[in-house]
Image (cartoon, rainbow, N blue to C red):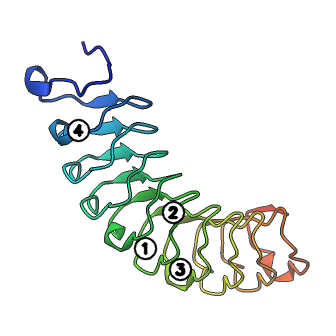
Amino acid sequence: DFIVSNETPDLRFNPRLFSLDLSGTKVTDVSALKNVHTLNLSDSNVTDVSALGNVHTLDLSGTNVSDVSALGNVHTLNLNYTKVSDVSVLKNVHTLYLIWTKVTDVSALGNVHTLNLSVTKVTDVSALGNVHTLDLSFTKVTDVSDLGNVNTLILSGSKVTDVSALGNVHTLDLSFTKVTDVSALGNIKNLNI
């Protein structure tokens, strides 16, 4: 058993550690954690995550991390409330959370399965037509004409007004938008307006 403290645990005695929660700690050196499957470092003092490229599920929300260039192979990555702005290397991440980040260019993220861009300054989402689940709530996105093949699309609080291209979307959330014409949305299984 590990006793979580403000120091990085000594993993020499448990090299096959599956899951570790160091959220809210003062941990800064995480180089010994490169083989952990699921790692929660949210609200910790970590800034250098270059050793964590093989972690499967990684939560860095609320940290001062800005360089994620080594994290392109992480399966599930939470970067909410970080200083991250360049996400071009994250094109192979399966599930990516970027709420309240400085991200503006998402052109490389077209193959991400689940992508949350809520409350970002993203405006151009034309490259995201193959994303399965996409959350653009409270963004300044106006043009969603390329998102007709997205399975689940959350546009709550966005600036979208024209949804005529979204007739093939399975689940669509238009709450708190100024959309008035929903005539093209007759085939949608789950519609929230």
Q: Which residue is mark 3?
A: 129
Dot in front, 3 or 4: 4
Rendered image quadrant of residue 190: bottom right
Q: Which residue is mark 1?
A: 109
Rendering coords of residue 147 (x, y %): 60, 80
Q: Amino acid at mark 3?
A: Gly
Task: Give yes or no for contact between labels 3 and 1 (Cβ–Cβ under 8 Å).
Answer: no
The quarter of the rendered structure image containing the N terminus is top left
Question: In this orientation, which residue lies closer to the viewer: 17 or 120?
Answer: 120
The local secondary structure at tag 1 comes to loop
Task: Give yes or no for contact between labels 3 and 4 (Cβ–Cβ under 8 Å).
Answer: no
Rendering coords of residue 76 (x, y %): 38, 51
Which of marks 1 and 3 precedes in the sequence? 1
Residue most toward the right? 180
- Give the residue drawn at x 49%, y 45%: 62
Crowding at dot 2, Cα within 10 Å, few <14 / some 14-19 / many 20+, comes out as many
Task: Give yes or no for contact between labels 4 and 2 (Cβ–Cβ under 8 Å).
Answer: no
Dot in front, 1 or 4: 4
Q: Which residue is mark 2?
A: 115
Above or below, 127 relative to 44: below
How much space separates mark 3 and mark 2, taking CA atoms?
12 Å
Q: Which residue is mark 4?
A: 29
Which of marks 2 and 4 precedes in the sequence? 4
Above or below, 56 relative to 109: above
Say the numbered circle drawn on residue 71.
Answer: none
Specify whether 158 is left or right of 65. right
